[in-house]
Every structure is written in C-alpha cells, then in structure tokens.
Amino acid sequence: MRKLVSLFMALVMLATVIAIPAMADSAQDPITVSVFIGDPRDQPASDNKIFKKIEEEFGLKFEFEFLAGDLDETLGVKIAGQDYADLMDGGNSAEKLISAGALIDLMPYISEEKTPNIYNYIQPYLKRLLNDKGQLFIIPNYGRYYNTEEYGMNYVNGPAFFLQKKVLAWAGYPVIKTMDEYFDIIEKYVAANPTNDKGQANEGFAILCDSWRAFCLFNPVQHLMGRPNDGDVIVDIDNNYKTEAYVIQDYAKPYYKKLNELYHKGLISQDTFVMNYDQYIAKLSSGTVVGMFDQTWDFQTATDALTAAEMFDSTYQGLPIVYTEAEAGKPITEHYLNGTVINVNRGFGISVNCQYPERLVQFMEKMLSDDWQKIVWWGIEGEDYSVENGRMVRTYDQIQDAANAVWKNANSAYVLTNSMPKKQGKMDDGNSWDPAVQPENYYLQMNDYDKDFLAHYNMKRPLDFFNKPITLAPYGEAWQIDVTVDQAANDAKAAFQDTERKMLPQVIMCDASEFDATWQKFVDSVNAIPISDFVDFMQQQILDLVAKNS
Amino acid sequence: MRSANAETTAAVKKDLRIRPVSFGKRLWMQRQLMLMSVPMLLYIFLFNYFPLWGWITAFMNYNPAKPLFENEWVGMKNFVWLFSKPEFIGAIRNTFAMAAINLVFGFVFPILMALFLNEIRTMHFKRTVQTITYLPHFLSWVIVVGIAQTIFSSDGAVNKLLLSLGLVKAPVFFLGEGKYFWWLVGVINLWKECGWNTIIYLASMSAIDPALYEAADMDGAGRFKKMLHITLPGIKSTFLVLLVMNIGYLMEAGFEIQYLMGQNVVMDWSQTIDIFALKYGITKGQYSRAIAAGIFKSVVSIVLMLSANFTAKRLGEDTLL
C-alpha cells in the first residue's frame, strides 16, 4: 500500500514538472509584473477593487516601484545596473531609457489583426511616433482623441500665469491681459494686504527653480510672445519655421527686467531661487503665494490641499498674459492652447528584462477596449457612476470621492492606467471618456465659490479665460523632440539649462543699475556654450518633421 | 674573567639573533594569524580592488547597454575633455577650498574645546557640555541642512539678528550667493562634528602622566603654561596621526551637504568633484567621463596621503604607513 502511495506521489510530482512548461504558455497563468513609475505616488491598497478585477481577468499582479528622489538620478542608476522593471514609465526623461537600449521595440507585437485597438490608437500618428528605423518603444498614454475636434478640457492643464482668485475678487473681477496689468494687480494687492487672513506674510510672485521644473523660470517668454509651449525654443511658423532660443533674445529682456523691478520692490523673495519642489508646494498650499508662472499639473497637489482646507479663494485661476506691442515689437495674439497633442514617448515601455512582452502588449490591447476604458475612466457602473437617459453621470459625492487620494488608492487603478494608452474625447454614444470633461459633471463638481467666481466673468469654465486652441503645427510641440540622439546638441542643451538656472536668478536679483550688464553677461555665456549646437539641431529636426507630416 | 664574560655575551647574542627564516616557513609559523586575516583580505580585495577593474571604462565611450568590450576605445579623450572644462576645474577648486576649511576648523576648534573642557573640574558640568556638543553628530545631514536652511534663510534667525543689530540693511542672501557657500559648509560641519572630534583629544589628554602636572606645579607653572608645555605636547602624536589621516581624505570635502544645499544659483561654488561625477555619470548618463573624474580624485588622494605620511616621518613621529 505504502509503495502504491509513494508511486502515486512520484507520478503526481512528475506530472507537475511536465505540466509547468505547458502551462506557462497559457495567457491565464498568474504572474507578477514589476512596474516602475517615474513619479512619486502612493502604493494602491491591497484590496483595490480594480486591481482585483484585472487579476481575475488577466491573471496579472503588479508590483510597483515609485519614484523617490530625483528622476534622472534614479534612471541613471537603473541604466548603470541594467536593473529594469518589466514595465517602465520613465516620466519626463523616458528618452534616456530609449537611448540606453532599455526598452524593446513594440512594433513586432502590434498589428491590425493581433492588436486592433492599439493599432487604431496609434495609426493616425504613426509618422510622428515611429523613429527612423520604424521602431516604437512607448505607446503614448495621453493625447489620442476620438470622435471630437474640441479641446478636451474644461480648464487649462498646461502653462499660464496664475493668480489667486481672491486677488481678482478683491480688484473687482477685472480682465487681465498684459504683463504690466498682471504684475500691477499683484503689487497693489500685496501693498493693501501684506499678510493673509492667518497673519502669514503674502509673497507677490514665486518662481520655482528646482531641477527640471525650472521651466517656471525659463518658459514664460514664449507665451508672452503668443506661442504655445515649444520647450526651450520658439518657432516662427510664418517665417519658414525659423527656430531660436527665446530666452537670450531682446524680447525676453522686458520680462526679466520686470522681475528685477519686482524683486527690488520686495514682491519676489530671495528664497524662491533656492527652494525645492516640496517647499514650493508647501508655500502654495499655505495660500500665501499671490501669483506664479507654472503648469496646472505641476502644482495639482497644492490645489488639492487648498481645496481640502476649503481655502477656495486661495486657489488659482490661470491667465493668458501676453506682451504689449511695444514690448514684443509686434502685435501679439494670445495662443497658450495648442490643438490636441499626442504625448510622444510618455507612458509605458516594456524593458529588455521582461520575460513576457507579448502578454503585456495583449494586456494593454484588452485594456484599450471600450468596456475596460469605461472602467478605467469612470469605474464600475452603479458604484462609481450611473447612466441616465444614455448619459453617464456621477453624484456630487461620487465626484468628491474620485478626487480623494485615499479613495483612489482603494477604488481605482490610476497608478497603473495613468501610464497606459487611454481613449480621450468622446465615446461612440456621445459620452466623454474623461468624466471631468463630461459637461454636466463639470459644473456639478465645482464648489460654490468657483461658480460664483466664474459667474462674475459670465463664464462657465476656467478654460473660457483663454482663446480657442490653435491648430497644432506640423512638427507637433518642439519639447517632444528627442535631443539625446545627438551628443553635441544634448551637451549644449544641458549647459544651456544650467546657465539659465544659475544666471537668470542673478539677472533678477542684481542692482537695477547693473541690469543691462548682467543681462549681457548672461546672453554672452549662453552664446559661448555654443547654444547654436542645440538650436541648429532643433531647427533641422523641426524642418524634417514638417516635411514628413505635411 | 673579562674575556669569558665577553664570550658568554656573544654566545647569548648569537642564540638570541633571529635566524633568517624562509618566507614559507614563517608563513607556516604564523598560520593561525594568517588564517584569521583571510576574510579581511578577501573583503578588501573583493570590494576595494576588484571593482577598480571598471576603471577601464574611463578610456572608452561606455554605454551600459553594450557588452563591455564592444564599446569604442577613446584613449585619454575623456580626461582631455575634463580638463578643458572650466566646470571641472571649478569643482577641483571647490573641493580643495571646502576641504581645507573643514580641515582647519576640524583641528583648531575641537582642540581648543578639548583644552577648555580638560580644565573644567566640575565633572557634572563637563559631562553635560560634552554630551550636548557631540549630539549633533548623530543627526542625519538631511536634518542638519534643513535646520541650516531655516536659520540662514532671508527671514531666518541669523538675518533677523543681523537686522535687529543694525549690522545689515537688507537680509543677507546666505543660501544663494556663492561667496558665502564655502564658509557656510565650514560652519555647519563644525556645528555637527566639533563635539564629537573633541572626544579623541580628551582621551589622549587623560593619558598624560599626572606627575608631569605636579612637577610643573612645583616649578610654579600656571594654567596656561601647563596647557602650552604639557597638554599640547602630550597630544602631539595623536594630532599628527589624525592629520595624516585627514590629509588623505582632503579630497573628501563631503558630499551630502553640498548635494543638499548646493542650489543651481551657487553651483559655481558648491559643485565638488563627487557631485560633478554624480551629475555627469548618473544624471546625464556620461559614465566614462564621470569615471575619469573619479580616477583623477583617487590618484590625487593617494599622492596627498603619501606626502603627508612622509612629512610626519620627518617630524619624528609614529606614522601610519
């Protein structure tokens, strides 16, 4: 009997051994996928309902590593050690992963038959997305709009000059258009209100200068000149796409001259040039910063904190500020908003260390189906939203939940799906993919202060402060161009940004009498890099892209 | 009698003379000791010498994605690039300047403090002072720099004090002006490490024979004479050993403090060789150039260490090597 038992056991074990390789082919075999996200976030709760559903359907579990510290340093360490997660979202420095050979080409896994959803997703932008060798390393996470020509937002997620709403209210809801008007209202407000209602000193204008987020210091001039965000260069679309570094041009001088004046009036604090991102967010969250130039997503946490503290009047309204004709040398029309832009090279890539790329591409394919996209954007019907007369709606509480970080941790797979390809725009039945864009929801989610604030301007949405988006230029947005492919251009760009971070604060802080000399020194330093290595490269790339796309 | 005596002495001497033994035999005789040192040797070889083999990448255009020897050899190009870059020359200057400030502060103040503490007769007070002054040593740099940034900010304690005393008209921008940076590093380092560094001097002071002090008392020496002629010479050898060790570390101007406090505005003054290497190697992915910078630093350190050791030998003191 005993012998029989042991024989049986041996057979069972043998069967298991044989069965394992056979089972590995099955798409349902449970595996744990390691994920790196180039953004600091919180781990999702272990009983998260969406992750549970994903595990049931795909047999996939996820193990997240979120960014702690500096993104470039973290990626540099990973590259040096070839230590990659299966799914890598390199955030703002994803190009580094591509040029280091960390990601695999996804095109062999994508075709009209095998992955119809992904194929359809990237198809209109193939020229823009594929490199010279026809490779695709990252499927963009945002910017693919379906069934709509409209700007897919109710607020401006991108760059603007921001002003606390209470300042506009204090001044009687004026319409602010020019740089002088903008800084004038800040000056008057701070003079009349040196402290906020808690007795903390008000700070006129903050400038974030921390690592890559120092775009708050560099970028304003292009917008003052009436162009959308092209990164470090400005492109003259009327003059054969002539490209130049705007910060060193004469038309940049009035802006920094103005900041110099503001600094000497005490409206800009010294500490703004040495504060890091966390200190900046803390400052904004305290409600003492009257204005700043930034992009909405960059200080979202501060907005959330102000809202949670019910300091609605200290939240910010973005304003499309431009130069006057005298300052710019030509009449300027405001163009802060661009047409819809596919988010090139932002999102998940699959690393060379990944054992099952086919399965992960198929996972993204299935997640891009309409049914899953509804779950990704809206959640579960009946729990997170309901359908009335064919319209998808959320109650006030459901909207509040969806904006709550703790709730999201347990009820949304946001940390994962944020980096995955997503549908934006409208569903075939006319509902918006993004709940925040669904008109009936947007008005409902606004607090009374905001409704009242907008009512004074006869507006429905914060977006209405801005002109309609202009048609996207054929080269896309120039900040998306990958500079890492050219060593000289890359070196020049890095040196350029270092010089800006180092010397622009000096330009702003120097004695008014020395302003011209300091400015000239800055311009000379940038030209000595030589900056032409970078600008010439950008010019060529832009002309190539124009030729390719038009 | 005399000759017999001399003979015995010679015989004794002959017996006592250590016979030349072959290396292998001596190794065998000391086998237990050798065996005990094996783990240490292995450790040093594995972690200190073996990684040096990666230095060859300094002579390549290294890309981690490629197998090592498929990278292109570029000879001394990376070193030439380094020394043609004003930023690197500045980093060398900053490293030496801050290290020198740290070295001087790190000797003068702890020795002074140890001397004073040594003179205190109330044990209770002495202990309290000692404990309070060495506690900052256990704080992490992140916290220390955080405190310093608050104290030295434009509305921080230091500026408030200067303003209220009427010494300055506008707040001094300690954190954002290059000329203050080295001294700020020196002062912060001093605050953190001074108390800790006194411990070793106090220990060596307590080893001085009390008879010397008593004899000096008899000769009518006062407190300061005793300090000058007994206490200070008594700690001379400790001082020299520490000096040799610290000169070996002269290229280590610190890393955390410059990393945490060195904002872009003061980059020209705050960037040390280590931070330069980190920036180019890890942040910008130019590994070969960073390794070249690292090699340069190591070579200079070795030269400094050897010359300090040589000098100490000439001064007739015990040396490390």
Image (cartoon, coloured by chain):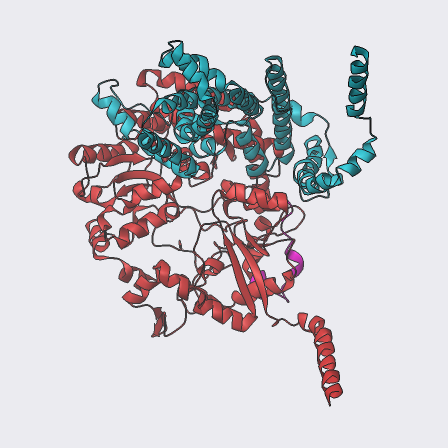
Chain colours: A red, B cyan
In the image, residue A280 lies at what x, y percent?
35, 40
Magenta stretch contains residue B194: no
Tell me if residue A21 comes above or below residue B227 in the rendering: below
- Across the whole image, how many numbered discs are drawn on residues? 0
Tell me if residue B24 comes above or below residue A64 in the rendering: above
Which image quadrant is residue A111 in? bottom right
In the image, residue A263 lies at what x, y percent?
29, 27
- Left/right placement of residue B202 relative to residue A172 reads right
The boundaries of the magenta stretch are A100-119
Tell me if residue B63 comes above or below residue B303 in the rendering: below
Q: Toward the viewer: A517 or B213? A: B213
At a point 47% along the width and 66% down the height, the residue shown is A373
The residue sitting at the bottom extreme is A1
The residue sitting at the top extreme is B219
Q: Toward the viewer: A264 or B101? A: B101
Which image quadrant is residue B79 in? top right
In the image, residue B158 lies at what x, y percent?
29, 26
Q: Is residue B29 visible?
A: yes
> Which secondary structure dominates the residues rendered in magenta?
loop
- Left/right placement of residue B129 relative to residue A244 reads left
Q: Split into 4 quadrants, where in the image is the N terminus of chain A?
A: bottom right
Which image quadrant is residue A325 in? top left
In the image, residue B13 lies at what x, y percent?
78, 20
Tell me if residue A151 comes above or below residue A13 in the rendering: above
Q: Is residue A160 visible?
A: no
Q: Toward the viewer: A336 or B137? A: B137
At a point 67% along the width and 58% down the height, the residue shown is A108
Q: Toward the viewer: A105 or B46? A: B46
